[in-house]
Amino acid sequence: MPDNLSENQIRIFDTTLRDGEQAPGCSMTLSEKLRVAKALSELNVDIIEAGFPAASPGDFESVKAIADRNFGPVICGLARCNAADIERVHAAVKGADNHRIHVFVATSAIHREYKLKMAKDEIIKSAVGAIKIARELCDDVEFSPEDASRTELSYLAEVVSAAIEAGASTVNIPDTVGYTVPAEFNRLFCYLKEHVARINEITLSVHCHNDLGMAVANSLAAVGAGARQIECTINGIGERAGNCSLEEAVMAIKTRSEFFGVCTKIDTTRLYPTSRLVSNITGMHPPRNKAIVGENAFSHEAGIHQHGMLQHASTYEIMRPEDVGLSHSNLILGKHSGRHAFRDRAKELGFELDDFEINRAFQDFKKLADKKKDIYDGDIESIIMNASGSASGPWSLKSLEIQTHTDQPATATVTLVGEDGVDVSESAHGDGPVAAALQALERATGVDMILLNFELHSASSGEDAQGEVTVTVEINGQIFRGRGASVDIVEAGCRAGLEVMNRTLRRRARGETNADSTQSAHATI
């Protein structure tokens, strides 16, 4: 066990910005990645895997920007076992006071034969060489044998032994394709503990995918066998069915501390706000029945359950909503509420906003309060998310008029206000009100786009609930995502489309071509 890690402390290695972002539709802009990195530091994760710098120039720049901010956690970058990748990672992460280089190579028979076409000894030589190169640049080096759960145990032990001898300070055991089951994975870790001589000198890590729905269970099984780092993502996002969910693993360890006998440094009251931030940025909202952060996680409808809850909350709740950043009270603000009450409520919900952000969000709150009788926590969260992440200028929506008739095309008229204060109005027809509104926006801004996906999510309950809309569009062959919120879903869609158009116009003004596009290459472990 490394000197700086106590026997019962589990390091949380968050890979939302690397493995999580690889999920289709989850790529993030630089500003979005910085917001997530800041939230992860406030959550108190130990390590942030900020990206795969060799994947694209944009990924390199985002990892470097996060490292240079020095948020607090160790900043890590992923590299294949070659000098170019490793040097690229070091150049990106070296600005952080604490940084790590993470190298990987596949070890399973199926990967050796069909992907790498390399013999066992060649793979070990590649891993050892890469670790030694990384150690010349950085003291903190992690190694992952990709597809470890399908690798022969004796060979896996040989690879891990070689990695430790070469200087790896963390060895991660990935269930890359979500194939293993808890009992089997526990035995794998026990085998390594018994057959690798110096394994107690390094940190054993676990990285699980959720293809069979067991990523969290497998990760916890590994902890039971001696793993002291869990690699996970917010909301469990990631390749295919996703990764081990950070909030589920952390709350399992906290709630069942007497069973696991370990702990984390995570500030669990930040779990829900961080979940909301990531879902808002990626457009991937957790299912209502998602553990810990789903809308139903602390809801009770059955009469027997409600009766029990009224007698004592512990009858049907094993966690308090406050423990994960949710409030017991839900309905507290209205149009007569003041700025101070709004700031306090935002703070209770886990948001730390500066004066500029509070002022902008409060203005949106007052506008919404004129439209809705009751303001729910979800409404406030939606306001803050959209206010803090909204793209400024060159256009803002002044008004939207929609006309629809049965069996006739819809007509939309939008009026935009430019940065110079001049209004521009355009009208268009479409198969529906959303299509008509977006076409009118295209005419007004001069930005042509193809709508690929339109997602609607209710921010709160009730007939007048705010609709949060995420649009995925294609502009000049590149994929972009925009968000908007309103009690009118057409207006929300219009605002989401306008956000993308504003970003596109700003990029054009700066002469950029791909700053917000999806990254060009991915790596998975």
Image: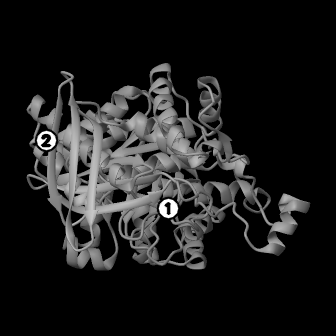
Q: Residues within 10 Å of mark 1 (few under 14, many from 20)?
A: some
Asked whether the beta carbons under mark 2 and mark 1 sit within 8 Å of each other, the answer is no
- Eye-nearest disc, 2 or 1: 2
Residue 169 appears in the figure: yes
Which residue is at 40% across, 52% downward? 488
**Measured along the vertical axis of the image, is residue 202 above or below residue 58?**
below
The foreground one among 436 and 315 is: 436
Q: Where is residue 54 in the image (x, y as percent from the top left)?
A: 21, 47
Query: In this figure, which residue is indicated by the disc labeled 2?
Result: 444
Mark 2–mark 1 distance (CA, rounded to whole Å): 35 Å
Q: Where is residue 42 in the image (x, y as percent from the top left)?
A: 55, 35
Q: Residues within 10 Å of mark 2 (few under 14, many from 20)?
A: some
Q: Where is residue 186 in the image (x, y as percent from the top left)?
A: 59, 72
The foreground one among 65 and 284 is: 284
What quarter of the picture does the C terminus occupy?
Answer: bottom left
Q: Choose top left, top right, bottom left or bottom right for residue 345.
A: top right
Question: How many numbered marks appear?
Answer: 2
**Callout 1 secondary element:** loop
Which residue is at 33% across, 35% downward? 93
Which residue is at 38% across, 27% downward? 69
Is 515 left, or right, of 349 in this rendering?
Answer: left
Q: Where is residue 9 in the image (x, y as percent from the top left)?
A: 66, 47
Identify residue type, mark 1. Pro
Query: In this figure, which residue is indicated by the disc labeled 1?
Result: 286
Q: Choose top left, top right, bottom left or bottom right for residue 266.
A: top right
**Measured along the vertical axis of the image, is residue 427 above or below residue 30?**
below
The foreground one among 307 and 141 is: 307
